[in-house]
Amino acid sequence: MTASSPVAPKPLLTIEPRPGWVPLNLREIWQFRDLLFSLAGRDIRLRYRQTALGVSWVVLQPLIAGGLFSLVFGILAKMPSGDLPYFVLSYTGVLAYNVFSNTLNKAGICLVGNAQLVSKVYFPRMVLPLSTALSTLLDFAVGLIVLAILMGVYHTHIHLGAGLLLAPVMIAIILLMALGAGLWASALTVSYRDVQYVLPVLLQFVMYATPAGYKLSVVKDAAKHHPHLFTLYMLNPLSSVIEAFRWACLGEGELHWGWITYSAACALVLMLLGSIAFRRMERRFADVI
Amino acid sequence: MSSNSDVALRVQNVSKAYRIAHNATRATTLAEALVHRIKRPLQPPTYETFWALQDLSLEIKQGSVAGVIGRNGAGKSTFLKILSRITEPTSGKIELFGRIGSLLEVGTGFHPELTGRENIYLNGQILGMRKREVDRQFDAIVDFAGVEKFLDTPVKRYSSGMYVRLAFAVAAHLSSEILLVDEVLAVGDAEFQKKCLGKMGDVARSGRTVLFVSHNMSAVSTLCTEALVLHKGRTAFHGATQAAIAHYNEAGYNTHGSTWEREPDRKSSALVVQAVTATLKGEQPNHTLAVSVRLESRTAHKPAFMSIDVLDASGAGVAQAIPTLDRFIKDTPRAHDLEVEIDLPALIPGRYMLTLWVGSHNTEMLDFVQEIVAFEIEQSPTPGRTFPHNPMHGYVVPSSRVTVLDADLAVPAIR
């Protein structure tokens, strides 16, 4: 045996100040993946406890919003809806838009809403906003059942094809955008509670600035003589993907591949910047919240 | 084995500073922040730096149960928060040789609407367990907490004892090599406290390491193999438990009454106890304690009242004085100077400490400062008593009389 000095064991973890930018550390989030699902489960279980109508609210909310849109835009403003009843059109749009607004809304308040946890227990904080996406997806899945029924009822007017495969891609893009913005919003809310009041107002505005309750062709017609107005409208990264989702499910609407690519790029950039900003602000959460 | 290989954690020159913005520059809304920037574009915001921990260095060996003791604001909680990675140190380095599990406040992460079963899973996972691990430990947790019958009841319907038992059980079954425990034993009934202490002993015997923060000196002395005394963010003493407790009991106090003043801190409470002075007056057995208290209303709060606890040297409660149940502290953004007079019961000689509480309701605390000032009783309340008093027989000597009545023997005469 050689005379070897005992090797000092490597510490399992070293705690040090980390100035500047912090790596994303996705491996740690992976280790906490069970928590991701549990938090989403908690959110879903709690949301409709002590409500008279329970889970039916998941369906009722988009149904009512879709109904209102068909009343205002379809019946009063007489906007076109192709071969389909206006309601089918607006419901589908609202369903896709809700993926964005629900995720962003919930993600925005998730840190402040769990202030107790954040200031008392360590876990990768990003798990909290990420879990909101899961619970939104479940809501979305329930909403899809109603959409499937509507599609069945009006199957003679809907030309389904391979295009349907685009629907999940569009939802993924929307979700990514919402999460990117949500990470930012949640981290900002820790220092500035203003964000939680601004967000709903902003989302309301964005809803009218996306083709959720009406077809894109309406905007195109209105902006016939002002092409930059249409460009401006499409610069909203939600516009092309919500329209594309409706096209995929109902065969109504237009596909603008260029704009869809732009939206996908926006989503990736938002997600990347959002998570980097989140990690950077994260270290102060427990001290400020 | 080298002395290196059985270290559980090594702390090297760790400091933590908090920046406290002065009231005028503290912005909690974007608008305030913007307005401030616009008004004074060139003046940087002024901050005061408050060192919660300063240059802390120590090593804890595997399998030891280390007590962390110190007065309010000594840096105990900050230390645990850094160890459990809730907040980052400002400088220095900590090396951990094992998974760390923390139990900073019992029941954090419990949701009142969820059932016991749901909370066990959620809480376990928040504390870092995988679902599989919770599955494996589930029966042991339920068994330890003794809540079998209520597993599917929302925990908001639990008694506070059951709640605490369940919360402790989840954390105690973490498979971490280093366990941080903060004041859990302050809650729960005596029997459960004993069970918790036992569990922590088991944890230590299995070779794992426990860091135990407490004000309860008797728990520290029965449980801990060593103790660390923190004072104003620095190590005042680190070594054998009994020596540490002795150090703790003596540090920082005068004999007759003493004065305490709040260090600048980041307390966000609306009403805070700013300064306290206690002076012992009178002679045994009619001592009165004059306590001057300065409170500060920092932001709007509900009208409040206060209580003053008298504790023995180990931190166990002796008596509580509540001058009035009226909510007499009004919400005016200024300081309130109070003079409280407490007619002390006839106490046995020894050192006593005071803990102050202010709140708007017995369940709505605004501020709570523990063991901040001390006073010493030197004479026995019983005139002429020369043999010592023993706290085993209690702290209060009630006045008592005896009357001897002469009577005939009722026993029949011996035949």
Image (cartoon, coloured by chain):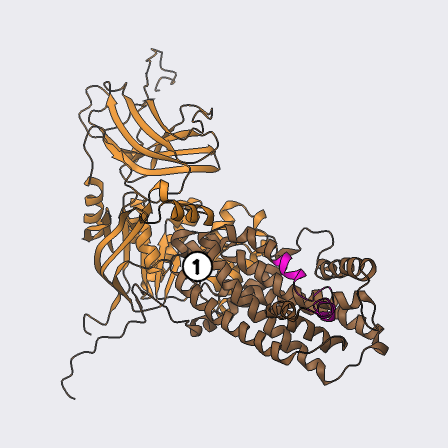
Chain colours: A brown, B orange
Whether residue A36 is visible here, answered yes or no, is yes
Tag 1: amino acid: Ala
Q: Which residue is mark 1?
A: B171
Label 1: state its secondary structure.
helix
Q: Horizontal placement of A155 versus A135: left or right?
A: right
Q: Could you say which is closer to the camera, residue B10 or residue B62? A: B10
Q: Horizontal placement of B143 versus A255: left or right?
A: left
Question: Residue pushed farthest left?
Answer: A3
Q: Horizontal placement of A36 versus A69: left or right?
A: left
Q: Is residue A222 magenta?
A: yes
Question: In x, y percent, where is residue B69?
Answer: 27, 48
Q: Could you say which is closer to the camera, residue B102 or residue A110? A: A110
**Vertical comparison of B249 with A236: above or below:** above
Find residue B322 and report its image quarter: top left
Find residue A121 and report its image quarter: bottom left
- Magenta span of residues: A203-225
- The chain to which mark 1 is attached is B
Determine the residue positioned at 32% across, 19% down. Answer: B399
Q: Is residue B149 magenta?
A: no
**Vertical comparison of A97 with B227: above or below:** below
Whether residue B135 is visible here, answered yes or no, is no
